[in-house]
Amino acid sequence: MGPFGGLHIHLYNSRPMEWEALARVNRRRKRRQRERRRRGRVWSLVRGVLVGAFCALLLSAVAGVAAFAYTYRAVSEDLPELDSYRTAELAQTSVVYDAEGNVVDELHGVQNRFVVELHEVAPTLRDAVVAVEDRRFYEHRGLDFGAIGRAAWENAKNLSVQEGGSTITQQLIKNTFIAQEERQLPSFGRKLTEASLAWQYEKEHPKEEILERYLNTVYFGANAYGAEAAAKTYYDKRAADLTLSEAAMLAGIINLPGAYDPFSDPGSARARRDVVLDRMLESGYINEMEHKAAIAEDLGLSRGRVEYEDDNEYFLDAVRKELAEEYGDEAVYEGGLKIYTTLDPRLQGLAANAVDGVVSPELGDPSASLVSVEPSTGAVRAMVGGSDFAQVKFNLATQGRRQPGSAFKTFVLAEAIRQGISTDTKYVSEYLTVPMGPFAEPYEVANYDFHERGPITLKTATEQSDNTVFVQLGLDLGMENVVDMANKMGIESALEAYPSTAIGGLGEGVSPYEMASAYSTLANGGVHMEPYLIEKVTREEEGGEERTIREHEPESREVLTRDQAAAVTQTLRGVVERGTASRYRDLLGEVGRPSAGKTGTSENFVDAWYVGYVPQLATSVWVGYPEERVSMVNINGLEEINGENYPLDIYSAYMQTALDGLPVEQLDTPSDDLELKVKTSGRAYDEPERTSPTTGATTGETTRETTGGGETTAPRSPLAPGSPPLAPQTPSSARPPPQYTTP
């Protein structure tokens, strides 16, 4: 082959190689172009998204501002009167004090709160709350837009309302102006309303006032609202006395009270406290040394609460009911009242011990009630209304209406003395049948064990508690008059003018509270002082001024003259020294001074009473089962419980110690000016006429007149005016059952 042929072959073989290289270059160039175009499209997309997001955020911001502006304009003219929230909205705990000024009860509803001024809150707590809840509090004007922006970003990421960015002012608005049911609902509308109100509120109120009101409204868990209640609840101290560590712990609770409860989860509470201390350090409220020392401390909790005594609960329950009836539950449990009572803590403890020392209802014994009244004032100093208030809320002392039995005879005796009848008057003690009219069965009454004593004086009949004599005496006096006397002396329960009423057989019954009050009339020289439990009620107003809204005003009523009351007392003293009250006890020796009183037992031993007094104290004791008509027989080796045993045991145990330290005061005795006549007319026993040994003539009708205990003769006095010959005409079905027991 020639050279051309070889050259041709060479050229032919090299061109494909060049083309292949060229193709590779072109392919690389095209790939780079495609990548540049793809990156361009991606960047365009990113720029579009960013621009869209920016526009959306801008529109959202504009919409938010517009919404805020609209809401502000909409509500600014109709905002509530912000300055009135403290009295209209803010519930405060009421406090009850005994006669010595000790706190014995705290009354609150849902919110336990004590309102205090800002200077009464420790600076450490004020700083801790600001540091953790609203660090720019002193810089913004109700709204922290930086916090709102951060919250908005978090809410946008989560597509829900997770954070609010609320300032202390906004929280205050929420706690005081937003309805309770709406506060926990996440709502943009509610947030805007809060913001509008907060903005307007800060225009009119300084920061110190806002912080003070916030610290009085914010919830700290454990039913404690406000700093003062929180300090009492967790540390048993006042908010002014909190340490740095304690203040930080309380401030940490506010965010999530359930999660940071130091009683149930101390670990979480301590960790949260340390976060608060870190924030305080960052904000410059504390230095490194203070921070380190506080971090090292334990929580040091001291569960603060009033140590309620079961002994007090029946008394306090009566106080709560009385106030609620007068002022309503809202005022009592939310009004921040200071309630000063007549309760004597020493006497109350002695009364409870005396009752517990005799009866044990948990072991099957009957229950008991005791009420002790100061005769000169009417102040109720002690009240036992049952054995266990936690188990039985029914107050036997004030709500219990039971048959008084022979303890009611004192009112018959008092009416007899008022009508001028001497206790030397005689009646025949015998089984008695009293006609009740043509359409009713006769009323029958007998003495205990059907004992008949024959002609006896009223003095002896009182000492021996004779039923038949007192029914006759009541009929002679007029049972309407007896009922009126009992009412004036202090019995407020409904009484019927039946023969059985004379010996305590009542339709409704009476309470131990009434009986103590009524007998105190005799101890106070015949003047009845209305019994009361509350000395005064006050409330703290704006500026710390305490205003009295109720103060006890003594209510007195002269029922008997001093001499008449002394005559009744003299006879009841015989009950103590010679009568039914002396059979098992020596009260004169045990109590250490003269006293007067009367036993009482109702039919079938259902109720047992002793009511007695000295000049300084009148005390009633009732023993029985709370259930109606349960006989007290065969109990602890006793055949029956009556006025001579359990009630007297309780009375003696109480009065022995209750009178310690009090001077011995003598019971009144009637003066020579008191004129009482021996009654021989009506149902009274008239001594048989006697023949004169010198003239053989019969003596005329006479009645003895006593003057201060001396005796003279005088013409017989007529039957007391208004005394009916028989009891009112009533169907037998309407009459109380006859009374047969009478110790």
Image (tube, helix red, strand yellow):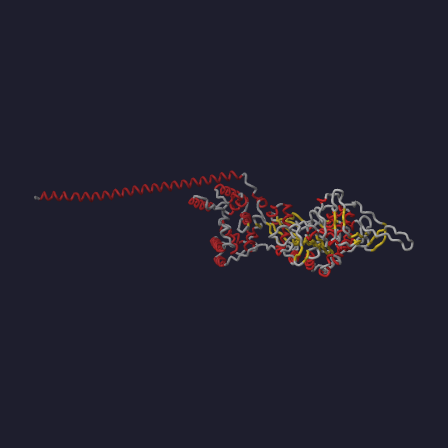
| Residue 554 sits above or below residue 655 on the image | above
Depth order, front residue of 171/534: 534
In the displayed structure image, the side of residue 466 where residue 716 appears, left or right: right
Quadrant containing the C terminus in the rendered view: bottom right
Residue 256, horizontal then vertical, whole percent: 49, 50
In the displayed structure image, the side of residue 43 where residue 141 appears, left or right: right
Q: Quadrant of residue 311?
A: bottom right
Residue 85, horizontal then vertical, whole percent: 57, 44
Is residue 239 shown to the viewer in this render?
Answer: no
Depth order, front residue of 295/351: 351
Residue that extends furthest to the left in the rendered view of this protein? 1
Residue 340, horizontal then vertical, whole percent: 65, 52
| Residue 55 sits above or below residue 470 on the image | above
| Residue 426 sits above or below residue 2 on the image | below
Is residue 418 shown to the viewer in this render?
Answer: yes
Depth order, front residue of 70/472: 472
Depth order, front residue of 64/176: 176
Quadrant containing the N terminus in the rendered view: top left
Residue that extends furthest to the right in the rendered view of this protein? 695
Residue 101, horizontal then vertical, whole percent: 64, 54
Task: Tally the numbered discs.
Answer: 0
